[in-house]
Image: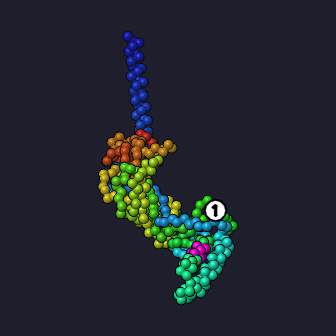
Amino acid sequence: MKNWTISVLILLTLAGCSKNENQAGRLSEKAIHVVTAPVKSEKVITALRYSGTIEAYQTIPLTFQLTGTVKSVLVAEGDEIRKGQLLATIDDTDSKNMYQIASAKYQQAKDAYDRLKTVYEKGSLTEVKWVEMETNLQQAQSSMEISRNSLEKCRLISPVNGVVGKRNVEPGMSSISIGSAPIEIVDIRQVYVKISVPENELSKISKGMKARFTVSALGEDAYDGEVKNISPVADRISRTYEVRILVGNPGMTLKPGMVCDVKMNNNAEKETLLVPYQSVLSESNKNLYVFVADPVQKRVKKTPVSVGQYSGSDIEVLSGLTAGQLIVKEGKEKVSDNSLISF
């Protein structure tokens, strides 16, 4: 009985010591000063955001209509050109000779026609012979026109105003060995911004809808456009729909191929949870989290979150928080899960 009593006394003594040590540890823990901010619930106008690519308003591939050896190329990529401007030529020696032969035959037939016309009018030429002369003249004229057209086809002429987008030809090349159009003309006085829209957002976009976008390559300038085309067929692989936005480009600073960030407001409000964007931290595996402050216990809890779009200096929280909670805005780098804090 005596031994049992001694054992109980020893256990009580050890428990008391442990409790005192824990209390001492808590008292020695230094509180970390932080600044907190509440999780706000606000109504915001939702915006649709996409990554877009600039395309030319019109692209015209030009090819030679005859085979031959390229004689000259008179333009380079990026050159502004006018309608009717000569762009390139192929060797026209054979075509020129054929035209000269055809012209000589036409002149011969014309002279014969003029000489016999008076004879025919006096009744001294048979009807059959006169019809033959008319036929010869028409055939000679047609042959001359064909040879003239062939000669003209040795010259590559621009059918529109625009800019040389691509030049795939050099002097000395054979026109039949060129794998693509020798010269490509683009009209970029207006351009399209092409975006891919998921099927669940397609109903939010309509023709005439306004859009604003920025191009990182051109700085912070914003450009405005209007939705012109919405594809009725989804891409078989991405299952997205192509939407094209028409934008004026008077200075032609927007170039085909540039990547841009597109924003469109659909004027619909929704209740959104917002927190300061700088309060959201990222782990090495890219998971996002914040520190939620308990004003009673004066401790923080590491809480995973998922976020949406930015709204000024705030960011939308999709999950992980509720309105009214306090999160650590400043001093978050000094705390860890369950850290003691002061306000």
Residue 229: say if magenta.
no
Q: Split into 4 quadrants, where in the image is the N terminus?
A: top left
Nearest the viewer among 146 and 157 is: 146
Tell me which segment is drawn in magenta.
137-147
Q: Quadrant of residue 304?
A: top left
Q: Where 274 falls versus 226 (above or below)? A: above
Residue 114: tell me if it is visible.
no
* Residue 150, x across and y down, in percent: 60, 72
Q: Quadrant of residue 193?
A: bottom left
Q: Where 329 falls versus 164 (above or below)? A: above
Q: Main secondary structure of the magenta part?
A: helix
Q: Quadrant of residue 208?
A: bottom left
The residue tagged 1 is: 176
Nearest the viewer among 246 and 22 is: 246
Question: Looking at the picture, which amino acid does disc 1 mark?
Answer: Ile
113 horizontally vs 251: left or right: right
Nearest the viewer among 342 and 9 is: 342
Q: Secondary structure at mark 1?
A: loop
Residue 138: say if magenta.
yes
Nearest the viewer among 227 and 223 is: 227
